[in-house]
Image (cartoon, helix red, strand yellow):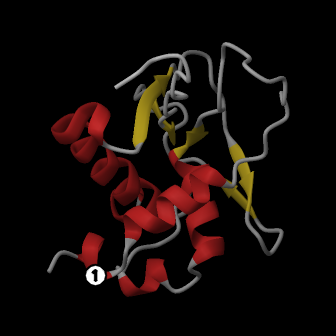
Amino acid sequence: MSLWTKHDIEGKVCAALGNVTLVNKEKGHHFARPYMTAYQLALKVHEVDPDLADQLDKKLGGSDGDQRDSLARYLANQLSRRIKRQGEGFPVEGAFLSNDRVEALQYTTSDGKSLTSSVSRTGKDLSLFRLRETPEPDPLRHS
């Protein structure tokens, strides 16, 4: 059994992405649900399951750690593979945010500590994720 399945990481990711603060609550806004960076997602997943990073033998992330062995990078890589393989059948969609002229991205952990992205100023684009919108059923359409 994969670690992804064993630890129900997809369920934790979906729970975290479903708990994104919606500032633009206008019904039907054409931008839909906001994306989260891989770091924001890792922080939310960490809130859902504080032991997951340790169980996966990963650090949470940040410029002070090994960026190749972080929960943020693990989630981004796993989600990217699943999105590529399953396409619109996967409940999460991804995108990139340009890293052009980004000096630093800083996040706050649930215990108030500062976490700086290790991706800033690397020339790599920043991974973004959100729950895929499910179309509303058309009440006038008959099956």
Residue 1 placement: quadrant: bottom left
Which residue is at the front of the view, 143 or 115?
143
What residue appears at the point 59 percent right and 82 percent down from the top-left corner?
50
Which residue is at the front of the view, 57 or 85?
85
Which residue is at the front of the view, 77 or 27?
27
**56 over 22 or under it: above or below:** below
Residue 84, horizontal then vertical, whole percent: 21, 35
Residue 25, horizontal then vertical, whole percent: 84, 30
What residue appears at the point 41 percent right and 35 percent down from the top-left corner?
93
Left of 7 or right of it: where is 14?
right
Amino acid type at image mark 1: Lys
Residue 72, horizontal then vertical, whole percent: 46, 56
What residue appears at the point 44 percent right and 66 percent down from the top-left corner?
11
Residue 112 placement: quadrant: bottom right
Residue 65 visible in the current orientation: no
Determine crowd level at label 1: few under 14, some 14-19, many 20+ residues with C-alpha closer than 10 A. Answer: few
Q: Secondary structure at mark 1?
A: helix
Which residue is at the front of the view, 62 or 23?
23
Q: Which residue is mark 1?
A: 6
**58 over 51 or under it: above or below:** above
**112 over 14 or under it: above or below:** below
Residue 4, horizontal then vertical, whole percent: 28, 70
What residue appears at the point 57 percent right and 61 percent down from the top-left corner?
15
